[in-house]
C-alpha cells in the first residue's frame, strides 16, 4: 500500500487524542545528505499531538546544517544538532543514545513522515510494557517527489504482536522504535560494523533485535504507532539496494553462526531458499524484483564469507 502526503494530512487532521502525562523522552534522528527530507521529518514530529522533550539530530552529511536547531522553539522541544564523523548509522545512533538526556528513547530515520499520535502511541506502549520491552510500530509507504518511487522497508500488518525467544524472523524496525536506556546498558549498543555507511551496509536492526530476544526481552509490535516511509528511491536504486541488504544480512548470519547451535545456519539457508523460489515465480511477470532476489542471495553469500574472514565473533 502506498499513500500520498495529501491523503495523510486529510486523515490526520481529523484525529484528536487526550493522553496521560508521559515520561521525559529523547528522539534520535540520524541523517546523511538528505537535508530536505530530514527537515520535513522533524517538522512532522513537531506537528504531532505530543512531542518528545528533545530531538537529537546526528548529521553525517558532507556539510553541517545547524539551522535545524531553531525548529523546535515553538513546541518547547529542544533540538540538539551534532555534525559527526565517521560515517555509519550504527555509530550515529549510538552517539545519539549517549548524547540523550533522558532514559526513554525513540528512534526514527530521516526519510520518515510521522502520524500526529505516533510519538505518544509508541512511548505509551513502552511505558505500559516496562523496561524489559522494546516497541516497534507500523511503517507504511508514502509517495514522495519521485514518480514511481519505492520505499524499501515497510510493515503494514494491523494486528498487534508480542515476540519472545527465537522467532525465526526479523521483527524489529529501528526506524520506528522505542526503548529504555537500560536495554543497551544490558545487551550492548548497535554493532558499528553493521548498517548503512559500513562495509556491511544493513542488518544492524536484525542484529539488535536478535540480541534483545536472546536476552529475554520482548519486542512489541504496536500498529497504532504509524509512520510513513518516504518513497523517494527510484527503480534505478533497486538492485544495488537489494545487494546491500544481502551483504548486511549475510554478515548478521555469520556473526551469530555457531557449530553447537545451528539456529542461525537454518535461518540463512531458509532465507536463501525462499528468495530463490521467489526469483523463479517472479521471473515472467516482474523481472526487476526477480533480479533483486538474485542480488540479495549473492549479497548474503558475499557478506557471510567476508564477515567470517575479517571479523571477530564478539558481539557489540
Image (cartoon, helix red, strand yellow):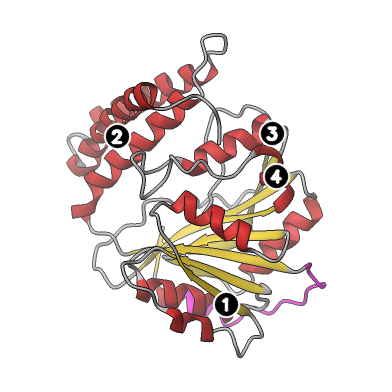
> Vertical placement of 207 versus 158: above or below?
above
Q: Are marks 4 and 2 in contact (CB under 8 Å)?
A: no
Residue at 68 percent across and 79 percent down: it is 16
Report the residue marked by disc 4.
Answer: 185
Point 48% across, 49% down: residue: 90
Query: Please, which residue is most extreme toward the bottom here?
Result: 74
Q: Write the residue at 58% across / 34% down.
A: 210
In the image, 202 versus 66, the foreground residue is 66
Q: Is residue 277 visible?
A: no
Front disc: 4 or 2:
4
Q: Secondary structure at mark 1?
A: strand
Disc 1: which residue: 79
> Where residue 133 sits in the image (x, y, percent)?
73, 45
Q: Is residue 61 left or right of residue 14?
A: left
Separation of residues labelled 3 and 2 (CA atoms): 27 Å
Discs 1/2, front: 1
Question: Between residues 51 and 138, which one lies in front from this camera angle?
Answer: 51
Amino acid at each position: 500500500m502506498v499513500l500520498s502526503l495529501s491523503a495523510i494530512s486529510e486523515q490526520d487532521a481529523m484525529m484528536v487524542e487526550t493522553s496521560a502525562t508521559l515520561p521525559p523522552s529523547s528522539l534520535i534522528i540520524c541523517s546523511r545528505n538528505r537535508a530536505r527530507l530530514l527537515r520535513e521529518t522533524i517538522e512532522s514530529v513537531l506537528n504531532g499531538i505530543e512531542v518528545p522533550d528533545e530531538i537529537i539530530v546526528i548529521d553525517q552529511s558532507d556539510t553541517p546544517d545547524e539551522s535545524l536547531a531553531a525548529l523546535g522553539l515553538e513546541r518547547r522541544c529542544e533540538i540538539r544538532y551534532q555534525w559527526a564523523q565517521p560515517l555509519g548509522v550504527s555509530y550515529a545512533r549510538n552517539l545519539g543514545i549517549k548524547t540523550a538526556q533522558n532514559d526513554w528513547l525513540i528512534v526514527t530515520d530521516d526519510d520518515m513522515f510521522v502520524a500526529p499520535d505516533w510519538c505518544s502511541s509508541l512511548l505509551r506502549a513502552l511505558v505500559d510494557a516496562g523496561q524489559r520491552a522494546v516497541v516497534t510500530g507500523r511503517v507504511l509507504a508514502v509517495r514522495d517527489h519521485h514518480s514511481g518511487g519505492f520505499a524499501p522497508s515497510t510493515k503494514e500488518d494491523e494486528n498487534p504482536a508480542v515476540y519472545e525467544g527465537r522467532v525465526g524472523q526479523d521483527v524489529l524496525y529501528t526506524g520506528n522504535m522505542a526503548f529504555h536506556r537500560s536495554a543497551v546498558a544490558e545487551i550492548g549498543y548497535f554493532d558499528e560494523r553493521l548498517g548503512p555507511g559500513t562495509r556491511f551496509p544493513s542488518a544492524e536492526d536484525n542484529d539488535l533485535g536478535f540480541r534483545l530476544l536472546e536476552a529475554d526481552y520482548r519486542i512489541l509490535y504496536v500498529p497504532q504507532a504509524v509512520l510513513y516511509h518516504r518513497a523517494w528511491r527510484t527503480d534505478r536504486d533497486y538492485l544495488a539496494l537489494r545487494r546491500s541488504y544481502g551483504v548486511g544480512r549475510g554478515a548478521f548470519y555469520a556473526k551469530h553462526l555457531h557449530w553447537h547451535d545451528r539456529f542461525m545456519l537454518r535461518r540463512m539457508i531458509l532465507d536463501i531458499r525462499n528468495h530463490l523460489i521467489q526469483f523463479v515465480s517472479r521471473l515472467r511477470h516482474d523481472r526487476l524484483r526477480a533480479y533483486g532476489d538474485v542480488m540479495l542471495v549473492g549479497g548474503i553469500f558475499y557478506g557471510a564469507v567476508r564477515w567470517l574472514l575479517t571479523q571477530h565473533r564478539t558481539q557489540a
